[in-house]
Image: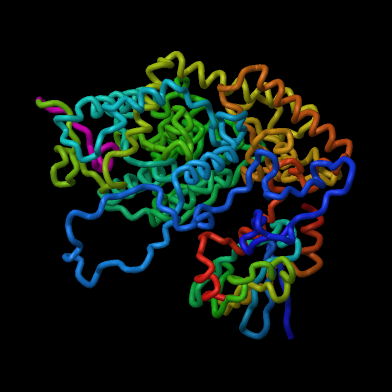
Amino acid sequence: MSMNNQGRPTGAGDPNRRRPIAPGTVTPEELDTISGDRGLDHEESLIFELDHGAVGVDLPDMEVGDDRLGGMRRTARIGLPGLSEPEVIRHYVRLSRKNYAIDSGLYPLGSCTMKHNPRLNEKMARLPGFGDLHPLAPASTTQGALELISQLMNWLTTLTGMPAVAMSPKAGAHGELCGLLAIRAAIAARGEDRKRVLVPESAHGTNPATAAFAGFTVDEVPAKPNGHVDAEALKAKLGPDVAAIMLTNPNTCGLFEGEIIDIAKAVHEAGAYFYCDGANFNAIAGKVRPGDLGIDAMHINLHKTFSTPHGGGGPGAGPVVLSARLAAYAPIPLLVADGKGLRLIEDMAAAPDGAKPFGRMCAFHGQMGMFSRALTYMLSHGRDGVRQASEDAVLSANYILASLKDVMSAPFGEGPCMHEALFDDSFLEGTGVTTLDFAKAMIDEGYHPMTMYFPLVVHGAMLIEPTESESKESLDRFIHVLHTLAEEALAKNVARFAGAPHLAPRRRLDETAAARKPVLRWKPDTLKQAAE
Amino acid sequence: MSEVRYTDQHEWIRLEGEEATVGITKYAAESLGDVVFVELPASGKAVTAGGTVTSANSALEKEPSKVNEDPEGEGWFFKLKLSDKSEFAKLMDKDAYAKFVDSL
């Protein structure tokens, strides 16, 4: 099979690619198809490569001249692909069929909370009053949408026990930045200069990245052999130059940080703030109120805990709840109620008495489409339902941990876990199979791999988060597959693992080459030649 | 005459006159797996090892694979002017480092 220079197989039209088929039977591996497609699994080029200059729509001639553009009038093609409507539709439908999604199977990525996105959410988000709103529509015409945001804020502050929430951050890391900017503003308002942020070594990579981006220096706190943050080491690092700590609870080893109240007390006594990474809130929503633990700021991934889509279905949302110590610094826009109803304050100068917004995180008011879905989830589950979802998520993870730890090594498996089960690669030692091989073999079995090699504090980590969405039958099937794979690895049946996936449209990809020499952008051949 | 010492963070430091060259050990390079990105310190930066950076191996920015291929040679990271040579003397020598690695 010949390849083009971006590593994809070339399709039909290449006269050298056909191999004669010998008489008799042919195995699927031997069958070299004429089209380049494999059955109904289509090879799909980039839309720019499919371009053949067609125009998919008829547009009327311009009724006004373009004289006013003068010399700025564009004369060259702008390089958009030209395709007919059915070609465009086929392109995107084919791409969508290549996607693995929570709608097609169990998606066990740890720390990602890939839970079912209820269809009721979609129905509500598509109501014209929510779905067709323009962000610049006058407040007098958007009272329903503002009421929705207000109710969602109430749910978030009630579930977390925090007095305030900033709704505009658009994802978890954006929420982290919002929280740290609020902390920075609060420290500046006290006339202090604190530059150090403490981050445990088991943290999500976004935590130190956010601290650095917000202008702080990062100081790493070690983990103890039992997977918990070393609270004594953390306390020893506290000092007058410490601005904040960033802690995840439950942490990325799937364990609840039991010393969190002590830690919060020490942090506050040192004059610092406590940021909590809320990525794992799905383990404790409705059970524990972060405000009661002494947390000053925490983002909530609506696309995790509150069932709005990840990625392809739309953007995420990462509202940040703030303690009384930080509430005044919440960014604009601020939602306020007065005699005339609800309105958004978009101007720093118009902030109400006592409010000292640190600025603005983004244009407009946050992800309305996520707000309507998240509130639907909350209202349809109720407070007891949110609590039960957390309990079921934890139960599912413990079922997996308990069912697999006889064959897979679980570094902290002596006790229960929270919403995710962590395994390491010590059970693979001497088998010739690596964590990567094991994860890739799951693709052959029809599963998206778990999170691998994270958290970094565990060697060859495999982190499985089943969420509450899976039925016992679904979990049993998954456990059966993993249990059998682990037995195969222990029996040194390496062939199954080496070079896996064997049955995916692409075999093992060269991840090192992709990282060292990434091709990030398509370029037309003419530009490529000019560059070479 | 050069002398090589090792840290418990798996760095090697080779002292030649006033100048020390710093890189990561073979053990570290193998543990890391394929290195895909190297961020080098700017010249003039003070580093915790107790010195000031005089130059960095900019070849690593284009070819981070050198760290895997030749960690204790062409894969060096940067050169330092040591502020206190007595700190250097406290680091592990080759035998002590080998024992340290064996103990891990």
For residue A151, what is the image quadrant? top left
Q: Quadrant of the N terminus of chain A?
A: bottom right
Q: Quadrant of the C terminus of chain A?
A: bottom right
- Kindly identify the residue that appears in the image at 63 percent across and 64 percent down: A5
Pick out the residue farthest to the left: A339
Judge left or right: residue A303 versus residue A162.
right
Residue A232 visible here: no
Residue closest to the eye, A415 or A89: A89
Residue closest to the eye, A100 or A287: A100
| Magenta part of the chain | A327-339
Judge left or right: residue A420 versus residue A506.
left
Q: Position of residue A339 (x, y in %)?
A: 10, 25
In this rendering, is residue B79 above or below A259?
below
Number of numbered callouts drawn:
0
- Kindly identify the residue that appears in the image at 72 percent across and 25 percent down: A479
Residue closest to the eye, B97 or A254: A254
Q: Position of residue A51 (x, y in %)?
A: 49, 56
In this rendering, is residue A234 above or below A477?
below
Residue A90 visible here: yes
In this rendering, is residue A355 above or below A515?
above
For residue A123, what is the image quadrant? top left
Residue closest to the eye, A413 or A236: A413
